[in-house]
Image (tube, rainbow, N blue to C red):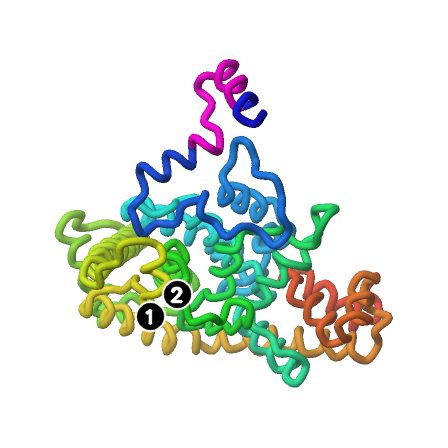
Amino acid sequence: MADQKSEIRNQKWPCLVGREAAEEREVAMLAPYATRSRESRGRRHPEPEHPLRTVYQRDRDRVVHSTAFRRLEYKTQVFVNHEGDYYRTRLTHTLEVAQISRTIARIMGLNEDLAEAIALAHDLGHTPFGHSGEEELRDQMRGHGGFEHNAHGLRVVDHLERRYPGFTGLNLSWEVREAIAKHTTRHDRPAVEEFNDGSQPVLEAQAVEVADEVAYNNHDIDDGLTAHLIRRDDLAGVEAWAVAAAEVESHQHGLPERLHDRQVIIRLINAQVTDLVETTLARIAELGIQDAEGVRCAGQRLFAFSATIQRQKADLEAFLHEKLYRHYRVARMTSKAKRFVRELFGAYLADEAQLPDDFRATARAEGLHRAICDYIAGMTDRYAQDEYKKLFYPYERV
């Protein structure tokens, strides 16, 4: 019957590319070490396959339509939301990571849909106020199950999103859920028991990890320059910047400063992504990786930069840490952010009745600390600030 329906669709719409045709295309076109949709380990709750979309295309669409994804628009990257509308937010950062991830996947013959789905989902567990908000929530949850934003992202897609009658969460594929749980960068060290099996995540997930670092390093430079928190004179002493700037000046001499800076950042991203792909393909060949299972059993992440680019990248990150993340204005934002989270948490802990009904239900089932954590972690910067006013400003409407 399924074959008959497929034949009828193809007769009616001869140009229609359904799920089965897309899966066949993956088999024919993707690299042997890529992750194919038809080989997915499936979903926690069984569902019929979609006739037109592959499993990872459905994952991507479910993430994009989720509440948590929309909230990323008003969650901090480095600069708190009210500081200005130019600076990156979690949403714009996520889109930039998705773009870089798809580029890497396309060049290497990986599954672009899977890479995009993972990239769009990778920051769903972030708190308001960036890493400072996460640090404060971690302090508040010490002794009560802890908090880590990747583990919380898995909680978001497995439990907190409510869009389907038959189950909680988005019911994403095993591969996307694993990628969220194992997302590892210099900021992220998740430990989720369900996926703590010693295997490596799929290459598409590894591509998102490095795309995440490429995006936030280079775009934090852009935001830092715009905010005048870092100076071009200081950047001149950073090797990666100096090399890219020399290339820009040799081809486009005399550009206005702002345009010059943007061209340098473009070249930085291009250089890092090109080096990453070339180095990683060489590692795959050297280690004799033949298929997706070989990726899982490799014992190490396969994506890597060359020694030169890795050194330049480390120097750039050290510069950002010293000149941007430790700048007194960022320190003030960090202090205020922690105070917001700390005092909100304390107010709800002191009087559970101030929590919305559904979070009081969570408190009865999983404990008050976890309910408060879920509530605050889901807030945007703006909502957290408004909630603070409602709780602590006597004349603010509640």
Judged from the image, the secondary structure of the residue bearing numbered disc 2 is loop
Q: Indicate the quadrant where residue 232 lies.
A: bottom left
Q: Can residue 333 be seen here?
A: no
> Rounded to the nearest whole Å, what is the CA distance between mark 1 and mark 2?
7 Å
Q: Is residue 13 above or below residue 316?
A: above
| Residue 299 marker | 1
Q: Indicate the quadrant where residue 243 lies.
A: bottom left
| Residue 200 marker | 2
Q: Is residue 31 above or below residue 123?
A: above
At horizontal 39% and vertical 45% (from top left) the residue drawn is: 112
At horizontal 63% and vertical 83% (from top left) the residue drawn is: 142
Q: Residue 225 versus residue 167: which sits nearer the camera?
A: 167
Asked if the magenta segment contains residue 13, the reply would be yes
Q: Left of 102 or right of it: where is 193? A: right
Q: Left of 321 or right of it: where is 256? A: left
Residue segment shown in magenta: 6-21
Q: Residue 71 versus residue 209: which sits nearer the camera?
A: 209
> Horizontal and vertical percent for residue 384?
68, 65
Q: Is residue 180 above or below residue 38?
A: below
Asked if the magenta segment contains residue 1, the reply would be no
Crowdedness near tag 1: few (<14), some (14–19) or many (≥20) residues, C-alpha within 10 Å: few
Crowdedness near tag 2: few (<14), some (14–19) or many (≥20) residues, C-alpha within 10 Å: many
At horizontal 52% and vertical 45% (from top left) the residue drawn is: 60
Q: Do the residues bearing badges 1 and 2 touch, measured as CB atoms within 8 Å?
A: yes
Q: Amino acid at mark 1?
A: Gly
* Residue that protrudes farthest toward the front in the picture: 1
Q: Left of 327 or right of it: where is 81? A: right
Q: Quadrant of the N terminus?
A: top right
Q: Earlier in the sequence, mark 1 or mark 2?
A: 2
* Residue that protrudes farthest toward the left in the picture: 250
